[in-house]
Amino acid sequence: MIEVRFHGRGGQGAVTAANILASSAFKEGKYVQAFPFFGVERRGAPVTAFTRIDERPIRIKTQIYEPDIVVVLDPSLLDTVDVTAGLKDGGTVIVNTEKSKEEILSKLKKKPAKLALVDATTIALEVLGLPITNTSILGAVAKATGLVKLESVQDAIKEVFSGSLGEKNARAAEEAYNKTQVYEL
Amino acid sequence: MSGYEPIRKVISGNYAAAYAARDARVQVVAAYPITPQTSIIEKIAEFIANGEADIQYVPVESEHSAMAACIGASATGARAFTATSAQGLALMHEMLHWASGARLPIVMVDVNRAMAPPWSVWDDQTDSLAQRDTGWMQFYAENNQEVYDGVLMAFKVAEQVNLPAMVVESAFILSHTYDVVEMIPQKLVDEFLPPREPLYDLADFSRPFSVGALGTPDDYYEFRYKIARAMEDAVKVIRDVGKEFGERFGRDYGSMIELYRTEDADFVFLGLGSLMGTVKQAVDVLREEGYRVGAAKVRWFRPFPKRELYELAKTVDGIAVLDRNYSFGMEGILFTETKAALYGTDAHPLVRNYIVGLGGRDFTVKDIRNVASDMMKAMEGGETSEEILWYHLKRG
Amino acid sequence: MTLETLFEQKNSARKISLKSVDEYPEAPVSLGTTLSNFTGDWRTFIPVIDDGKCVKCYICWKFCPEPAIYIREDGYVGIDYDYCKGCGICANECPTKAITMEKEEK
């Protein structure tokens, strides 16, 4: 079972990102589960969301404490939230940032085995005209982890957002996929 | 099982409830929004707006009115549905008695949520279990699939025994968690669940009559007996409908208690709803570590599966009852029921009570392992905690 | 329903007494009708109408809780003494004092 934890701020779409990732894996024949941190959401407050992906039906109903993959939608969270808490050895961290690998690593409490960086905010602003990074960051997840294909992510995005909005968000994911820098550490 | 092609979707427990209501061809929905139930009725409203469902939606000013409107609709022969949670369910309480007393097969989804104060929107079974004596049947879903299946079966059972039924799912753990659900094509649902044949139709103006008028001490008693008997008859109906569901759709609900790896088990965990998914996972882990344990999930709490519980109790030395609820002045509610069901029988397992996860506190595989070792110690006669253990309590 | 059929039903109505639980309907529907419940027996004072004072406002007809007041073909009101309990609400409400309550001789 692969467990993914998303960190974002209320309104950035972390919960939707977790759902779209689950739908993408589902399209590839996997069993999935996606859920928000069971809390009260407020715009701007730090939020977490989770995705589980497995070959078998998923029975466990608890929150995720030891993720394989951590996805950070908002770089400012690195200063306030311990995003690597519980990260498994050999785990992957994906961050939306314009900063360098060294700068990001200096902010992480635990060094991941793999680090992926993408400036999802700039991509979202260019393609969508809005700083909502959830669909862009999923392109980075596909690139960095190989967990799902970019095409599956795009199909799942178009199911959530219809018409031209879906097309734009799918393009944002593709842009991010192409621009993500992946570092094996 | 007929080789049918299910409609597989990744949806939340709440959406599973809404899709099931749509597929059951519900005719009237009256509901009032409350966290974490809201997305059920939002989705139903969307079905109506899109023309996907022919439902009369009655917006009301409270849950009490929601149930009253469902009662009115159901008394005219309509298939009626509602959904609520916690304080909303408590506000409905009076009308719940009315629905069962008038013998109306209304189906409701309750999203288990802790009762305030303090305010909490998280999972806790006390809201639904506090409605134990209202004459409603209660089905507890472990996952989103069981929410969907449960609503369809609840209608079929309810309409056969003419009693209302509650399908219970966990706040957030199911209601807002996306999971794979296999839905059934409409034609096959229709074959499983034909239109309702009501006991009476209050809208039959050619032969006016009243329902629920005064029952003097000379008559009231007999009507209570009728409800009691209908609830007992429901045991067979539930098992038959569950079996039929399995034959048609491949998921068998022929037993009121689902057993998981209980053969040769020294003791079993007994519980309701979503926490039993994690327990099954933990049973696999514990079995690998050499514990002989199993899980028994009570699917139907009302009517209570006395016979099945007895059959299970005969085969094990211990039962660890996991209660995400509490009856103040007594103990966990399932614990009470379990002991009562076994009283006077020849089954004498050690029965212990673990109060877990109240108000949504996470109950993990690690926690279940701790409960298992406490249970093993008790069964070996060693030093143990009290009989009713407030498992998560911060003790400094 | 015409008054004639109402009176016919009234005459044939009877109280049902059930002896065994099996005779009861499954749901608490009222099989019989309150037509068989002749509440006129309860009366001590009886309302008497003076058509000369009646202005056909029908306030008594609206207020009668039974209802035991009906509108006659000539437009004045009549009282169905089989059901009138003699509560006196009609007399109390009548704006022209056309209804008086008199001690009933039985």
Image: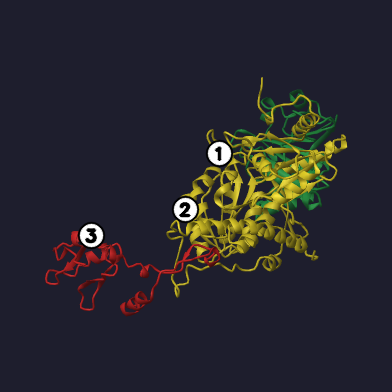
Chain colours: A green, B yellow, C red
Does dot 3 land on a helix, a strand or a loop? helix
Task: Please name the residue that numbered disc 2 is placed on.
Answer: B65
- Residue pictured at 45% horizontal, 56% vertical: B217
- Residue pictured at 69% horizontal, 50% vertical: B305
The one nearer the camera, B9 or B21, is: B21
Chain designation of label 3: C
Q: Are marks 2 and 1 on the same chain?
A: yes
Callout 3, which amino acid? Answer: Ile
The one nearer the camera, B251 or B352, is: B352
Task: Please name the residue that numbered disc 3 is placed on.
Answer: C89
The 10 Å Cα crowd at callout 1, few under 14, some 14 to 19, many 20 or more, is: many
The 10 Å Cα crowd at callout 3, few under 14, some 14 to 19, many 20 or more, is: some
The 10 Å Cα crowd at callout 2, few under 14, some 14 to 19, many 20 or more, is: some
Q: Is residue B62 above or below residue B356?
A: below
**Which circle marks residue B115 in the picture?**
1
Chain designation of label 1: B
Callout 1, which amino acid? Answer: Met
